[in-house]
Image (spheres, rainbow, N blue to C red):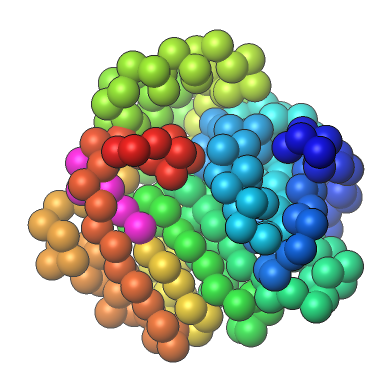
Amino acid sequence: MGFYDQRTNQVLIDALGIKIHTVANLADYPQANIIIVHGLGEHLEKYDQLTSFLLANHCNVFRYDQPGHGQSEGERGYLQAASDLETTLATLVEQVKSEYYYFPTFLIGHSMGGFTILRYLTQTTGQIAGAVAVDPFSVYQIPTLGKLPLDLDPHQVIPDQTSGGQGVNADSRVEQRAAQDPANLTNLKVGIMNALGNGAVELKENLNQITDPILFLHGQADGVVDYHGGAASPIITQFISKLCCSWLWLVNFSAKYDEFSFVVGSNH
């Protein structure tokens, strides 16, 4: 049976009443559940490579399009409040755990997905077995946009600041694939940037609420999520010092891009 024969598409209604597009890939001999949370402007299909790898290693994999992204409902590229993100994630976690309760459940999130997971973990304890946060939106200043919030109409369209040589990646093949993908958001709206900026402030104030195990990954040369000086960075040091989780791993990989799925699926 091929990879695409092992997937089931479903529509999930989250606690806000939004119809969320989800995909489940079930392993033949599962040992764990993995929920993947995509980043800003992305969609679940971008993580096919990672899903295939996890599936081959005996993991049930669940993905979803965040509100306003991919095939999920919501105004394209817009977000009313950062809390909407973890509300959707909480709904999927509950569903996965209720249906596949024999297996431990883990979360993997990139950029806005990592941000979503961290915010979720400030509000829950012991609901998941562990999490991976890759370049989370929550620990940076936005060099390409300037200071948030933006004093503009929240529904105003702004060019996507996460691609096109802005430090997301240093590989033209990734850019070419993104350009060919009609589901990628090429324009975002002021509202989503302001919601994420305000949500990041809230997150920093509540990091000490996180008690679940976390693997934190961050590329040294990431040009979107600012990171300098390794673990000694004032921003990362502040992030780590506020965490009181039982286990925390910090991995500093020398990636010149902020494309987690590509890093996992390549020899770089």
Instruction: Tell me: 21 left or right of 238.
Output: right
Instruction: Tell me: 105 left or right of 257.
Output: right
Considering depth in this image, is 148 or 179 the residue closer to the camera?
179
Q: Is residue 218 magenta?
A: yes
- Image quadrant holding the N terminus, namely top right
Rendered view: 170 above or below 6 = above
Secondary structure predominantly adopted by residues drawn in magenta:
strand
Total number of numbered labels? 0
| Place of residue 141 in the rendered image (x, y in percent of width and height, measured from the top left) | 28, 47
> Does residue 184 appear anywhere in the picture?
yes
Considering depth in this image, is 181 or 139 the residue closer to the camera?
181
In this picture, which residue range is highlighted in magenta?
A: 217-221
Which quarter of the picture shows residue 150? top left
Q: Is residue 143 magenta?
A: no
| Place of residue 50 in the rendered image (x, y in percent of width and height, measured from the top left) | 56, 44
Instruction: Tell me: 87 left or right of 125.
Output: right
- Image quadrant holding the C terminus, namely top left
